[in-house]
Image (cartoon, grey):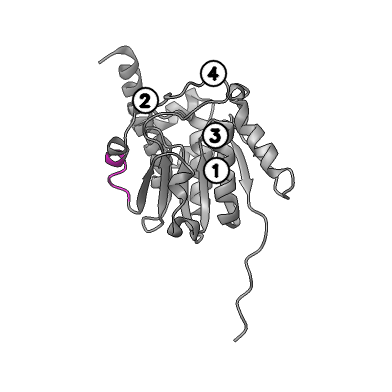
Amino acid sequence: MNLRRLRNHLLARLIERRPSLFLRLKGLTQHRLATDADFLRVHARLVRAGDCVQRLPERYHLWALARAAADQPGAWAEAGVYRGGSAEIICAAKPVTTALHLFDTFGGMPAVAPGDGAFQPGDFADTSVASVRSRLAGSGGVEFHPGFFPDTADTPALRATRFQFVHLDLDLYQSTLAGLEFFYPRLLPGGVLISHDYGDATVPGVKQAFDDFLRERPERVTPLWLTQGLLIKLGHSMPPTAQ
């Protein structure tokens, strides 16, 4: 076991066995996180795996927003899955019967524009559908859509789907814009769209895509700590038809 894996293993054991000490080390002794055993259990698994790009505050935001959406109608989605760390958080929070659609090339990043930061085509290729499927094997309702998004969403069933919860982690301007163009009109009123990297200055394409897309729309993004951005779809559901 190398030093990094050993460190991750010991930290995960600390979270599992002495969560109060872990939270004290993080300066979170007064946070309600101390009573959220379900989240801490997921967090420990992610720490042990060592392959989830979100950090503790971002993981908790994703968890808390997903839990808040759990009793609402509509499908869920994630675009930008990589090795499935954030999908594992979402699966732990969602109802078993709620559909979760996972979109990723599962083979690396597509073409990169000059303004997208230091990414290269093929980055994040060290994953596969099989490995993520195995990771989420205990979760119900998960559907995989491998290939280049949004082509993989261009089916009659997906075009007709309405979403309650969407997580974007697409890194690039054009990919993020495509995600907004597909999911925004299909997001239910009050539905949640959360994006990784919105506040990361080294990933400028993500925020630019949101700025451009929302310029003529009423919603605004709420920045979250550390780098995430939150969009909630405005509008109201239609009242039931009078009998």
Q: Position of residue 2 (x, y in %)?
A: 28, 13
Contact (Cβ within 8 Å) of mark 3 with mark 1? no
Kind of residue indicated by mark 4: Ala
Tell me which numbered mark, 3 or 1, is placed earlier along the sequence. Answer: 1
- The magenta stretch spans residue 63: no
Query: Looking at the picture, which amino acid does disc 1 mark?
Result: Gly
Q: CA distance from mark 1 to mark 2?
A: 27 Å
Would you name the residue on which mark 3 appears? 196
| Residue 37 in view (yes/no) | no
Local secondary structure at mark 1: helix
Callout in the foreground (2, 4): 4
Residue 210 x %, y %: 65, 38
Q: Nearer the viewer, mark 3 or mark 1?
A: 1
Disc number placed over residue 50 in the picture, else none: 2
The residue type indicated by label 2 comes to Gly
| Occupied quadrant, residue 130 | top left
Q: Which residue lies under the disc numbered 4?
A: 118
Read off the magenta span.
133-139
Label 3: how many Cα within 10 Å (few below 14, some 14–19, many 20+) = many
Vertical comparison of 163 with 237: above or below = above
